[in-house]
């Protein structure tokens, strides 16, 4: 068995990563089942904390957490809250021990930067350190790692998604896909239990809350609606309880609420919350005002009273998600719990009330997202057609119009990948350019929404107002990432502008940081490019050969000659040392197979419409029997 | 033009990415069975979703992405009765722009204005039940318009003289319902 694992010819193992606010987890699939890997801390939960020491070393996980109280500025926790955020974001004003670096240039204002004393770092770089640590753990145990699926909250906007993908690239990972956390959780449940139906995922993490309604039918998970509150989580429960404890300690004024006292009481609140998961009451000892200790007894009912307003906020998001999906609560076939905060008994009871049924709790709520990510990574790597995930755009995308309003081009809850074209015109006579401002959010005014990008289209000949026609096209890919193009139509002057992110990094910046990182002892950048180009080539060659076995009849004889020639050319340069030559040969193969690929897609469409192959149907029958067996087993357990 | 000031004027026009009926391989009819539409969308997603092309060349992935986007946009278009009617009118070479339509029936305009006033009043009075009641009445009215529109589209050639004003009315109802939902959310969010 061990020999199998370390077989040098074994394919690399795809990974699923839950990059969490509080903890991060890496998982993979073994014999069809997801397994969480042990991280550098010896457990599967790696605290999402990074310490930058004065000597220049980087420490991740429990060891970093241990240094948080002594060197708070050098120790960064909960950076997920800052992913894709600008230096002036309101998030930077919430309670925390961060020291922010002053932004002097426009470029620096685009992204939060932490001053750790010896080094200024961005949230992307901090997240990359967590990902590097997880990658190293996986390498140690699996030897060869393949592409990764990284999960993001369903509510993450484009800038936050871009930042997460950049962190993955910076950590030297091939990011196959960004996957929404609730969808990942549903995948973990759906695959293992083989159930069909409509489900709700209630995800209450450390800092965010998400609710997603999705349907599983014919092996396709389709998200019906999603909603949430990006500033509601288990941390808020701790804060509410800490506030009550501080009052009971007599620490009512700001003078007695020193950072040391607040952090002590917050930690006490967290342990009280955990203790009350099983116990009806607990006691905690805290320093009293004016010296000595005070013992405070906390009843579970007291905690429940304190968190009631928080649950009410979550409940509203749930009702809205149900309404957006056109469903009554009792129409759901199951409710899945995700996130450590769902361990609180009152949360479970509340979920049962809102959705009129007890939630499913079979899978550990801390691991379920990583499991789903691992399953998706495995599906993608195997090009499996067992399950397909259809996610939605969480927040509307639009363009700012005259007067600060918004023209929504893609509304929230649109299935992705998505695209739409809208036409605009000039407002003033002889206007020779367009200023395009892309925003994301539900508010009516552009100033209240998230600004994603600004760019201008110039060189429009002077025309009376309303004559020029600007066509704006939005494309959102399967990861929820946006690309915008704009063209001026009337004059035949067709210009195409690729959107540049206002927040986050552009490709050149990521490349530069990657070179810097590699220069610091992780090997040569050119060597990395060569390895990447070879891996990509091997995969494309494999896929092309598989395609030739299945659909060679769709190639005209001269095309076949071209394809064979392009394959031979790629094989010829693959052993060489030039990544550029390999890339060129790869592009050549791409061009030679373009028309054929289109015909193969048409065939796939035809067979999807005309009904599936017999073997496929048989497999589905087997699966249906699996469902029955599972339900019978479940019924047996219940009696 | 002041630099940095968006100077775009939205006329509400959208250009379809493709003919949605052709993209989904469905007969161009107004009365479309929603189960059939959903099944077809799933079948085509199964064939074209980018996840199915994860191991392929970047060109092939791009091609699949473009086609999957067309499929999803066609699905979104046909699910919405207003956009479905617009797509059918476009197939007959009729103008679909909102502003280019003929003037609305004065009686309809009057009724719309009265309902909007009532909605505004309910919002000011924070009367959630009233907001829901108004939305319910409009939804009922919308159903009647849809049924009438279905009949007008079945005729060969379709009865455009009837369809176009009905489409205008449908748009009013749509906007009203959107606004009512937004008000419901607002009242739910900040309870008095």
Image: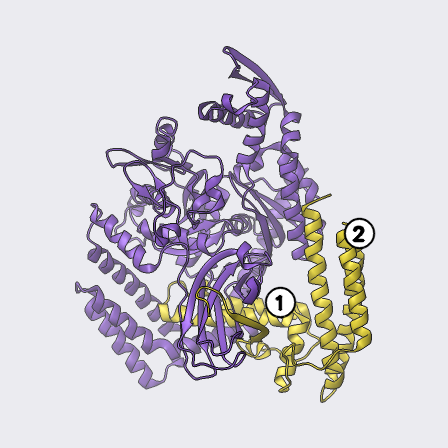
Please name the residue shown 34% across and 53% down the image: A169
Quadrant assignment, res A198:
bottom right
- Report the quarter where the C terminus of chain A lies: top right
Measuring from the top left, give residue B118's x and y in whole percent.
80, 60
Which residue matches tag 1? B38
Secondary structure beneath dot 2 equals helix
Near mark 1 (Cα within 10 A), the count class, few <14, some 14-19 or many ≥20, is few
Numbered tag placed on residue A194 in the rendering? none
- Report the quarter where the N terminus of chain A lies: top left
Q: Is residue A575 visible?
A: yes
Measuring from the top left, give residue A335's x and y in whole percent.
62, 46
Q: Chain of mark 2?
A: B
As rendered, which of A224 and A44 lies closer to the eye?
A: A224
Chain ID for purple: A
Measuring from the top left, give residue A105's x and y in whole percent.
34, 52
Q: Is residue A392 visible?
A: no
Q: Is residue A242 left or right of residue A570?
A: right
Of the two numbered discs 1 and 2 in the rendering, the one whose residue sits closer to the viewer: 2
Farthest-out residue, top: A292
Farthest-out residue, bottom: B157
Quadrant assignment, res B62:
bottom left
Quadrant assignment, res A20:
top left
The earlier-in-sequence mark between 1 and 2 is: 1
Near mark 2 (Cα within 10 A), the count class, few <14, some 14-19 or many ≥20, is few
Farthest-out residue, left: A577
Q: Chain of mark 1?
A: B
Label 1, label 2: how far apart the Cα atoms are: 33 Å
Which residue matches tag 2? B129
Chain ID for yellow: B
Height in image: A353 above or below A373? above
As rendered, which of A100 and B66 lies closer to the eye?
A: A100
As rendered, which of A569 and A304 lies closer to the eye?
A: A304
């Amino acid at each position: 068995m061990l020999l199998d694992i370390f077989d040098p010819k074994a394919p690399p193992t795809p990974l699923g990563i839950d990059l969490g606010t509080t903890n991060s987890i890496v998982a993979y699939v073994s014999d069809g089942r997801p397994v969480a890997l042990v991280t550098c801390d010896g457990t599967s939960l790696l605290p999402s904390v990074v310490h930058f020491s004065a000597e220049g070393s980087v420490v991740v996980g429990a060891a970093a957490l241990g240094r948080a109280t002594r060197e708070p500025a050098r120790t960064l926790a909960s950076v997920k809250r800052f992913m894709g955020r600008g230096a002036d974001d309101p998030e930077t004003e919430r309670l925390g021990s961060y020291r922010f670096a002053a932004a002097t240039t426009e470029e620096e204002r685009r992204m939060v930067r932490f001053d750790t004393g010896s080094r200024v770092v961005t949230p992307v770089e901090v997240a990359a350190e967590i990902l590097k640590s997880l990658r190293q753990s996986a390498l140690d145990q699996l030897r060869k790692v393949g592409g990764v699926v990284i999960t993001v909250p369903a509510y993450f906007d484009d800038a936050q998604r871009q930042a997460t993908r950049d962190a993955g690239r910076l950590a030297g990972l091939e990011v196959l896909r960004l996957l929404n956390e609730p969808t990942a959780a549903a995948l973990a449940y759906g695959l293992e239990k083989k159930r069909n139906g409509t489900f709700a995922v209630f995800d209450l993490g450390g800092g965010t809350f998400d609710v997603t309604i999705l349907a599983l039918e014919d092996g396709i998970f389709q998200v019906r609606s999603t909603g949430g509150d990006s500033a509601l989580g288990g941390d808020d429960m701790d804060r509410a309880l800490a506030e009550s404890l501080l009052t009971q300690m007599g620490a009512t004024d700001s003078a007695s609420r020193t950072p040391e006292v607040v952090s002590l009481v917050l930690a006490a609140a967290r342990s009280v919350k955990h203790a009350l998961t099983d116990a009806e009451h607990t006691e905690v000892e805290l320093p009293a005002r004016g010296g000595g200790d005070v013992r405070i007894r906390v009843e579970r009912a007291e905690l429940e009273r304190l968190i009631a307003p928080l649950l009410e906020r979550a409940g509203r998001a749930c009702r809205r998600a149900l309404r957006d999906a056109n469903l009554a609560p009792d129409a759901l076939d199951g409710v899945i719990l995700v996130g450590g905060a769902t361990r609180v008994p009152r949360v479970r009871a509340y979920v049962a009330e809102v959705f009129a049924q007890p939630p499913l709790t079979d899978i550990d709520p801390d691991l379920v997202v990583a499991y789903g990510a691992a399953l998706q990574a495995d599906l993608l790597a195997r090009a499996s057609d067992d399950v397909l995930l259809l996610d939605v755009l969480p927040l509307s995308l639009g363009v700012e119009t005259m007067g600060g309003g918004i023209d929504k081009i893609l509304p929230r809850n649109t299935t992705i990948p998505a695209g739409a074209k809208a036409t605009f015109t000039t407002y003033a006579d002889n206007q020779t350019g367009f200023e395009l401002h892309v925003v994301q959010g539900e508010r009516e005014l552009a100033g209240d929404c998230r600004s994603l990008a600004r760019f201008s289209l110039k060189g429009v000949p002077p025309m009376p107002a309303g004559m020029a026609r600007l066509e704006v096209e939005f494309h959102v890919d399967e990861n929820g990432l946006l690309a915008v193009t704009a063209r001026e139509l009337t004059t035949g002057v067709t210009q195409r502008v690729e959107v540049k992110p206002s927040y986050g990094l552009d490709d050149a910046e990521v490349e530069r940081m990657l070179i810097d990182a590699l220069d610091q002892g992780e090997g040569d950048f050119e060597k990395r490019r060569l390895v990447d180009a070879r891996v990509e080539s091997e995969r494309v060659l494999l896929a092309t050969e598989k395609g030739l076995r299945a659909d060679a009849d769709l190639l005209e004889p001269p095309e076949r000659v071209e394809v064979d020639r392009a394959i031979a050319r790629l094989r010829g340069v693959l052993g060489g040392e030039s990544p550029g030559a390999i890339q060129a040969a790869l592009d050549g193969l791409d061009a030679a197979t373009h028309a054929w690929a289109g015909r193969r897609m048409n065939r796939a469409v035809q067979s999807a419409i005309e009904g599936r192959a017999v073997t496929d149907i048989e497999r589905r029958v087997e699966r249906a029997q699996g469902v029955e067996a599972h339900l019978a087993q479940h019924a047996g357990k219940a009696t | 033009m002041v630099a940095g000031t968006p100077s775009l004027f939205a006329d509400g026009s959208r250009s379809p990415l493709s003919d949605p009926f052709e993209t989904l391989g469905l007969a161009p009819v107004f009365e479309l069975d929603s189960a059939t539409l959903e099944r077809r969308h799933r079948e085509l997603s199964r064939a074209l979703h980018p996840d199915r092309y994860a191991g392929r060349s970047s060109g092939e992935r791009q091609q699949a992405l473009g086609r999957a986007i067309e499929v999803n946009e066609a699905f979104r278009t046909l699910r919405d009765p207003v956009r479905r009617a617009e797509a059918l009118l476009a197939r007959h070479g009729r103008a679909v722009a909102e502003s280019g339509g003929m003037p609305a029936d004065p009686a309809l305009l009057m009724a719309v204005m009265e309902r909007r006033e009532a909605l505004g009043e309910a919002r000011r009075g924070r009367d959630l039940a009233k907001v829901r009641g108004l939305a319910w009445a409009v939804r009922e009215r919308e159903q009647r318009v849809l049924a009438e529109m279905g009949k007008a589209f079945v005729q060969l050639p379709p009865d455009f003289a009837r369809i176009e004003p009905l489409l205008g009315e449908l748009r009013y109802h749509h906007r009203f319902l959107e606004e009512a939902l937004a008000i419901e959310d607002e009242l739910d969010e900040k309870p008095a």
